[in-house]
């Protein structure tokens, strides 16, 4: 090499692809000796594509022969957009969850940055009338006109006049944006354009943040329990610690969060709040906006790519101090991050169930640790994982045992279904209770985790049932649309008029879902409005909001819903909550089913008796003596959880012993089984003494969406050993010839084994 040739620079780059490795590329000569930060995006040639990758580090040498080494096409950023802490978190997470690093990093980037070189966020345009400018500037009027001048000038343009007046009367200095204008009037765009051309109004842009609401703070005095919790958390001087706020429903956990936020925001910090779902709880955002004097952004999947990126950008640049988001918001860069809150930490939606299968709650804990900041986990029904960590003194527990309004928790009783006459799955005792509560002006919530009219149709003559062609499952009957739907693969077809097997028209709808319950109750209580809240009735934009509003106002006397209704809502008038079906969960093959049932019963029970009238909860079951129900009812969730933890310990299940799954599916059962058999063979190449492999076993639902599904369960008392093994195994599995005919994935700390 001639001495004056500039030194060749090489970088390890994470490229979005399914391979468990980084790729070496030559950096462009044009960058000279400029330092390149890890995390910077680059465009690189990859096969026949040009992809956006992320620089992980610069390296001195490479094993790639010089003639094979490709060059980076362009360096896209001048600094690491993700921030060093996110990069570290992701690198760790891709190893922990045994996921290809390029794909893991890509998951964390806003979609907009995955596809665009450009990093300018779209800002929100707003229009305003400027009072301060001199009357004439470049011969154009920029002063707010007097009413007379205005009438004269816009005599023949009433729409422009209306819009101008709306802008002039806007309460904030930010005038009105499109959202605000849409609420006030329609067809305003042409008028805005004309007013701009006439120089009567101005246009500007602002970042995509929610600014604080200008409302008087409610005079809430924290209860003694709340004060102690806040004090005890703050006594850690904002150092790292994991705090579990274990507070019964309605105990005022959110007030604790608000108090903690106030202190940190005043100190110039940013806060990340993770919630299971935003669409269901718009009140939460509202509450933070009302109470805290900071800019807020929300991040959730219902936003488009541009909106999401703009919100992400505002957080990354400290234009927003509070981020409220769902699962993937854990990857939001926050340069001044001072605290993380994970609300409803037990919720399953924190676990991503496909692709990069991370758990946002667990990554939040790691992020807080890396940043040496506190993290608050809140729940009325903490996960067994978190309770185990309390027992082992890794987390600090704080209890809120009383409801903030001092109202007692509702009385829970069981309705024994054995030998009872049932009406669409409801016992007569239950129906008379409903009547009693309605007569006393109470509101009733019925909970059943099954959409549709009936879980299946059956021929009364020959026993034929409506099975899905592609799954080991029945197709659910939806009466209003007169269709069969498979809730597992999405298949649909018209409901049959006669039996496919024998032609009989004697078809029975077996069992009941929300639609059937709604129908029956509406007939039985014709004077009461029955409202069904499930995915089918809330698909249209705004319909959920409308239904929730009617539930809040008391207009709907009976609410029938799925788990959408179990989360976070505060309906003050509900006096009776009924859980219609518990038996399935009591005998489920899923090892977490009991935990989920107990959480669900406790959470929905918390919806009763929030205001003046005392609440009551009825739970239907054919197994009133079941120990789970007995413990839960007589001793409470905590005792249930203690017992369940002991059972998990005895059975060697998480959290006692970590678990991972190798899942495999294929249209050919044989191909999936063969791959897993090869995987087991492969595992014999290494020492697996402290590692247990079970399988291949069929998944609990063996066929879904036309694919056969099998799995291997892996366990070890030593988490590190399991991790080491998996990170050796995964790239080897990729090389197996039998891997080409199947889809496979590794799931570390799986949420379920289906
Ligand atoms: P959680 O999140 O624990 O379910 P919230 O924080 O939503 O509870 O509080 C439940 C209700 O009690 C809310 O309406 C809230 O305004 C009210 N509340 C909470 N703390 C207090 C308090 N200290 N004094 C009066 N009302 C309170
Ligand atoms: Zn038949
Ligand atoms: Zn199906």
Image (cartoon, grey):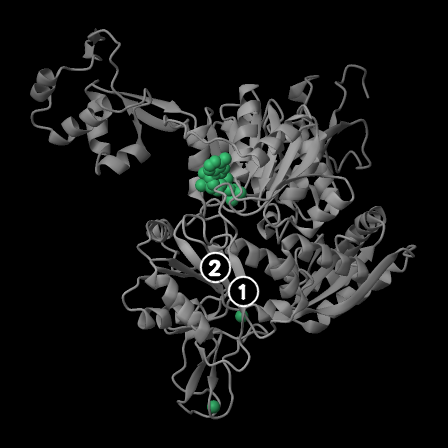
Q: In terms of depth relative to the viewer, which is nearer, 481 or 636?
A: 636
Q: Secondary structure at mark 2?
A: strand
Q: Residue 144 vs residue 619: left or right?
A: left
What percent of the width, then of the height, locates residue 176?
A: 29, 27
Residue 307 appears in view: no
Residue 618 appears in view: yes
Q: Quadrant of the C terminus?
A: bottom right
Q: At 23% from the left edge and 28% from the top edge, which residue is drawn? A: 192
Residue occupied by mark 2: 616
Q: At 71% from the left edge and 41% from the top edge, which residue is drawn? A: 93
Q: Residue 621 vs residue 479: left or right?
A: right
Category of crowding for the residue at label 2, using alpha-carbon neighbours closer than 10 angstroms: few (below 14), some (14–19), many (at least 20): many
Residue occupied by mark 1: 413
What percent of the width, then of the height, locates residue 195?
A: 20, 24
Q: In terms of depth relative to the viewer, which is nearer, 352 or 622?
A: 622
Q: Is residue 445 above or below residue 227?
A: below
Q: At 73% from the left edge and 43% from the top edge, which residue is drawn? A: 390
Determine which quarter of the picture holds residue 716: bottom right
What percent of the width, then of the height, locates residue 622?
A: 58, 75
Contact? badges 1 and 2 (CB < 8 Å): yes
Q: Is residue 749 above or below residue 207?
A: below
Q: In terms of depth relative to the viewer, which is nearer, 432 or 476?
A: 432
């Amino acid at each position: 090499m001639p001495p004056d040739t500039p030194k060749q620079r090489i970088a390890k780059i994470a490229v979005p692809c399914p391979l468990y490795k980084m790729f070496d590329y030559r950096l462009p000569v044009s960058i000279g000796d400029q330092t390149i930060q890890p995390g910077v995006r680059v465009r690189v040639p990859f096969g026949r594509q040009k992809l956006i990758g992320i620089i992980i580090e610069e390296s001195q040498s490479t094993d790639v022969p010089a003639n094979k080494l490709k060059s980076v096409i362009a360096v896209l950023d001048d600094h690491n957009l993700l921030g060093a802490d996110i990069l570290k978190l992701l690198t760790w997470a891709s190893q922990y969850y045994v996921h290809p690093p390029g794909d893991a990093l890509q998951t964390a980037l806003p979609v907009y940055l995955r596809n665009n070189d450009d990093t300018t966020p779209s800002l929100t345009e707003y229009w305003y009338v400027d009072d301060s400018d001199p009357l004439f500037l470049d011969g154009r009027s920029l002063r707010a006109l007097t009413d007379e001048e205005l009438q004269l000038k816009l005599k023949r343009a009433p729409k422009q006049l209306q819009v101008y007046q709306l802008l002039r009367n806007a309460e904030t200095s930010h005038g009105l944006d499109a959202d605000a204008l849409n609420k006030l009037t329609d067809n305003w765009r042409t008028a805005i354009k004309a007013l701009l051309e006439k120089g009567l109004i101005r246009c500007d842009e602002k970042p995509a943040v929610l600014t604080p609401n200008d409302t008087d703070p409610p005079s809430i005095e924290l209860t003694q329990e709340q004060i102690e919790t806040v004090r005890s958390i703050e006594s850690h001087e904002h150092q790292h610690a994991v705090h579990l706020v274990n507070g019964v429903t309605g105990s005022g956990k959110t007030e604790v969060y608000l108090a903690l936020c106030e202190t940190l925001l005043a100190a110039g910090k940013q806060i990340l709040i993770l919630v299971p779902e935003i669409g269901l709880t718009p009140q939460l955002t509202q509450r933070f906006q009302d109470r805290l004097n900071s800019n807020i952004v929300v991040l959730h999947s219902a936003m488009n790519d541009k909106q999401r990126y703009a919100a992400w950008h505002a957080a990354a640049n400290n234009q927003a101090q509070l981020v409220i988001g769902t699962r993937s918001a854990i990857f939001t860069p926050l340069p001044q991050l001072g605290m993380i809150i994970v609300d409803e930490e037990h919720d399953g939606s924190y676990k991503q169930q496909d692709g990069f299968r991370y758990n946002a709650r667990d990554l939040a804990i790691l992020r807080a640790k890396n940043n040496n900041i506190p993290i608050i986990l809140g729940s009325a029904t903490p996960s067994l994982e978190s309770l185990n960590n309390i027992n082992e003194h890794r987390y600090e527990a704080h209890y809120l045992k009383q409801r903030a309004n001092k109202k007692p928790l509702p009385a829970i009783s069981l309705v024994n279904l054995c030998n009872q006459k049932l009406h669409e799955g409801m016992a007569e005792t239950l129906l008379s209770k409903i009547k009693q509560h309605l007569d006393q002006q109470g509101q009733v919530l019925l909970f059943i985790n099954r959409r549709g009219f009936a879980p299946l149709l059956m021929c009364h003559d020959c026993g034929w049932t409506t099975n899905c062609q592609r799954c080991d499952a029945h197709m659910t009957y939806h009466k209003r649309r007169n269709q069969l739907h498979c809730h597992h693969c999405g298949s649909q077809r018209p409901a049959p008029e006669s039996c496919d097997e024998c032609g009989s028209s004697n078809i029975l709808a077996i069992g009941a879902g929300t639609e059937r319950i709604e129908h029956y109750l509406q007939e039985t209580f014709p004077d009461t409005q029955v409202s069904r809240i499930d995915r089918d009735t809330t698909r249209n934009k705004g319909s959920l909001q409308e239904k929730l509003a009617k539930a809040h106002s008391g207009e709907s006397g009976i609410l029938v819903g799925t788990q959408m209704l179990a989360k976070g809502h505060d309906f003050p008038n509900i006096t009776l909550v009924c859980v219609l079906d518990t038996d399935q969960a009591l005998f489920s093959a899923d090892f977490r089913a009991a935990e989920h049932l107990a959480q669900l019963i406790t959470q929905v029970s918390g919806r009763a008796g929030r205001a003046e009238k005392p609440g009551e909860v009825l739970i239907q079951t054919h197994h009133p003596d079941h120990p789970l129900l007995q413990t839960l009812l007589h001793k409470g969730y905590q005792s249930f959880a203690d017992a369940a933890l002991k059972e998990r310990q005895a059975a060697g299940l998480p959290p006692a012993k970590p678990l991972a799954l190798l899942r495999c599916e294929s249209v050919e059962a044989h191909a999936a089984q063969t791959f897993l058999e090869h995987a087991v063979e492969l595992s014999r190449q290494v020492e697996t003494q402290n590692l247990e492999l079970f399988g291949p076993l069929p998944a609990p639902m063996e066929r879904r969406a036309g694919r056969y599904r099998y799995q291997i369960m892996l366990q070890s008392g030593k988490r590190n050993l399991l991790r080491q093994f998996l990170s050796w195994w995964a790239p080897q599995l990729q090389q197996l010839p039998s891997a080409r005919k199947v889809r496979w994935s590794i799931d570390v700390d799986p949420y379920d084994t289906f």
